[in-house]
């Protein structure tokens, strides 16, 4: 049986991702200070709506913020994971350009369109073309992010600036108390789930062990919907296993039917993880329970996990940290190095062999 405790446990973690989570409070403080310092000349009353452009680890930050603030956000906000900006984005749209590396082609393509449309832009990046060319040539304000991390391991460095900027531009209500509570929750999660806490007392290590050999199906609802997507991505990128995310109530209108015909080889591997929080709509709570009853006979295991914390942002980050640790411990149990994402790098390398200009418009 692989050990998650003791000095050898982290040997396969070549980039130090597990220990890296231990620096989250310092990362949080740095990110908050950097976002508070950036000069933003846009009057809040000018902003009619918000788009955040990014991919992967840099886009999920915005989904998580939207999840946490979905009831209190004051302007419509969309997350754009695409080369093309939707038609409604214009001069009064705050466009947040989020790319950890600053070199992701979808985000760079969206950036040049946002500039062409005179949108109110701000970038969050550690460098690349987004961090060097656009601030100098186009005057795009940049929240600088420390370089040298995997984007998904820099989540707080990308997410906290989104909260601070949206708070400063009054798209969100004042965020100071939320940030203070979230910071405490993060410190508490590290103290409970970190690598030095033995497996016998560590819920993240225990959950990881129970997931060995499974395909996680992660369900969320309302605030936990984007957290389910983050968990899925972390299982994919850290543990290098397939994982799937869905949301209630929508999945009750289609996906549940598929469980009736679940091939037994697949069902015997499926682990359903339900991410819950006490403030979910009463019918959503009932849906979790009733859907579980219907689906449980068709899967290997079901676990229900509830967020800790009072404020929405704290709850979101509490569950995010749990998922991060679980996916990393699962990688270690599987003897996999959680750091490198060779498949993504290979794909990006192949795509970079050609340019990525716009395809010609279809002839009318
Ligand atoms: C890698 C990761 C990826 C990247 C994505 C976009 O750790 O999480 O999902 O976030 O490929 O790259 P960036 O964030 O550099 O724009």
Image (cartoon, grey):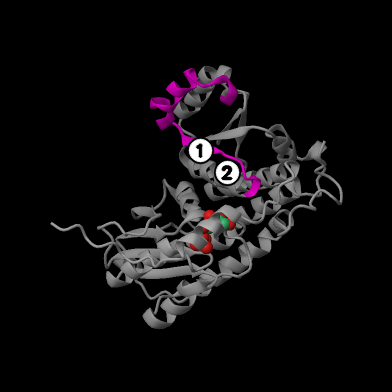
Marks 2,1: beta carbons within 8 A: yes
Q: Earlier in the sequence, mark 2 or mark 1?
A: 2
> The C terminus lies in which quarter of the figure?
bottom left
Magenta stretch: give its range.
238-266
Q: Residue at x 60, y 58 (%)?
A: 180
Instruction: Confirm whether residue 179 shows in the render.
Output: no
Q: Nearer the viewer, residue 218 or 105?
A: 105
Q: Nearer the viewer, residue 40 or 274?
A: 274
Q: How many marks?
A: 2
Q: Nearer the viewer, residue 171 or 63?
A: 63
State the image quarter where residue 122 is shown.
bottom left
Residue denoted by label 2: 231
Q: x and y percent of residue 1 in the render?
A: 82, 35
Beta carbon at label 2 within 8 Å of ligand 1: no
State the image quarter where residue 303 is shown.
top right
Residue denoted by label 1: 245
Q: Residue at x 47, y 25 (%)?
A: 287
């Amino acid at each position: 049986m692989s050990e998650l405790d003791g000095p050898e446990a982290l040997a396969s973690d070549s980039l130090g991702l597990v220990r890296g989570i231990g620096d989250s409070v310092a990362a949080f403080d740095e990110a908050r200070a950097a976002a508070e310092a950036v000069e933003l000349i846009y009057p809040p009353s000018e902003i009619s709506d918000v788009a955040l452009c990014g991919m992967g680890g840099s886009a999920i930050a915005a989904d998580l913020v939207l999840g946490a603030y979905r009831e209190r956000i004051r302007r419509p906000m969309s997350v754009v994971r695409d080369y093309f900006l939707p038609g409604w984005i214009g001069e009064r749209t705050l466009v947040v350009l989020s790319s950890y590396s600053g070199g992701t082609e979808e985000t760079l393509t969206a950036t040049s369109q946002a500039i062409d449309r005179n949108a109110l832009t701000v970038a969050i990046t550690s460098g690349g073309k987004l961090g060097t060319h656009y601030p100098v040539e186009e005057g795009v304000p940049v929240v600088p992010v420390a370089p040298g991390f995997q984007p998904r391991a820099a989540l707080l460095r990308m997410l906290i600036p989104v909260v601070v900027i949206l708070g400063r531009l009054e798209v969100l209500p004042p965020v100071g108390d939320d940030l203070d509570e979230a910071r405490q929750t993060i410190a508490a999660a590290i103290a409970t789930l970190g690598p030095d806490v033995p497996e016998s007392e560590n819920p993240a290590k225990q959950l990881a062990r129970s997931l060995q050999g499974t395909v996680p199906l992660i369900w969320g609802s309302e605030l936990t919907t984007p957290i389910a997507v983050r968990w899925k991505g972390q299982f994919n990128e850290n543990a290098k296993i397939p994982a799937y995310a869905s949301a209630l109530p929508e999945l009750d209108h289609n996906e549940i039917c598929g469980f009736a015909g679940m091939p037994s080889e697949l069902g015997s591997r499926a682990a359903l993880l339900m991410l819950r929080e006490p403030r979910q709509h009463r019918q959503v709570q009932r849906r979790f329970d009733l859907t579980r009853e219907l689906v449980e006979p068709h899967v290997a295991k079901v676990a229900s996990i509830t967020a800790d914390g009072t404020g929405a942002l704290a709850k979101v980050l509490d569950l995010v940290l749990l998922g991060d640790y679980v996916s990393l411990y699962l990688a270690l149990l599987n003897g996999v190095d959680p750091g490198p994402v060779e498949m993504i790098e290979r794909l990006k390398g192949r795509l970079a062999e050609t340019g990525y200009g716009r395809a010609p418009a279809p002839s009318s």
